[in-house]
Amino acid sequence: MRENVETLFVASEDIATALNLLDSIEVEIGFDSDDPESVEQAILAVEEAINTRLSSHRGDSRIESAILRVKLDFRCAIFDQASSDEGDDEVISSVHTLQ
């Protein structure tokens, strides 16, 4: 029984570490809002940055769910920026906090 307790503790520490990494992700990107390919490349760049940062913490369903949520938040922010008339040359800088 003692081994199970230790395994759970290690798993909890790994999850906490991964969530802390996600909690502090800052990504700056630039793209041409009139060019769908540029927008898609920006999204892929953000997703790659997240994947790279969390590569050693993948596998747990809670971590995967949090990763998907952060990716979606960035994707929505990019699409919102691309569809707005303001700040065509602005760089999106975004910090996401998990609750």
Image: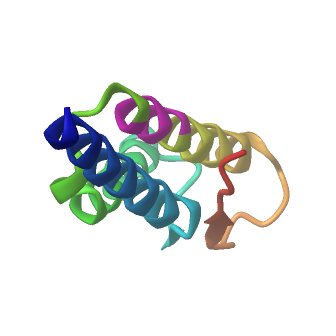
In this picture, residue 53 sits left or right of residue 67: left
What range is drawn magenta here? 63-69
17 or 23, nearer to the observer? 17
Counting the numbered discs, the total is 0
Q: Position of residue 86 (x, y in %)?
A: 85, 59
Instruction: Work out which residue is located at the far front of the displayed protein and give it.
Output: 1
58 part of magenta stretch: no
Q: Is residue 78 left or right of residue 39?
A: right
Q: Is residue 4 above or below residue 48?
A: above
* Closer to us: 99 or 85: 99
With 33 as the anchor, is 35 left or right in this view? left
- The residue at the point 57 percent across, 47 percent down is 74
Examine the rendered structure and indicate whether residue 23 appears above or below residue 84: below
User: Is residue 66 covered in magenta?
Assistant: yes
Residue at point 54% right, 34% down? 69
Give the answer, above or below, for where 68 lies relative to 92.
above
Which residue is pictured at 20% across the width and 41% down the height?
Answer: 2
- Where residue 44 sits: x, y (%)? 32, 48
Near-viewer residue (49 or 80): 49
Colour scheme of the picture = rainbow
- Magenta stretch: dominant SS? helix
Which residue lies at the image location 56% right of the left edge and 70% below the top edge? 24
The percent coordinates of residue 61 (x first, y second) are 34, 26
The C terminus lies in quadrant: top right
Q: Is residue 32 left or right of residue 8?
A: right
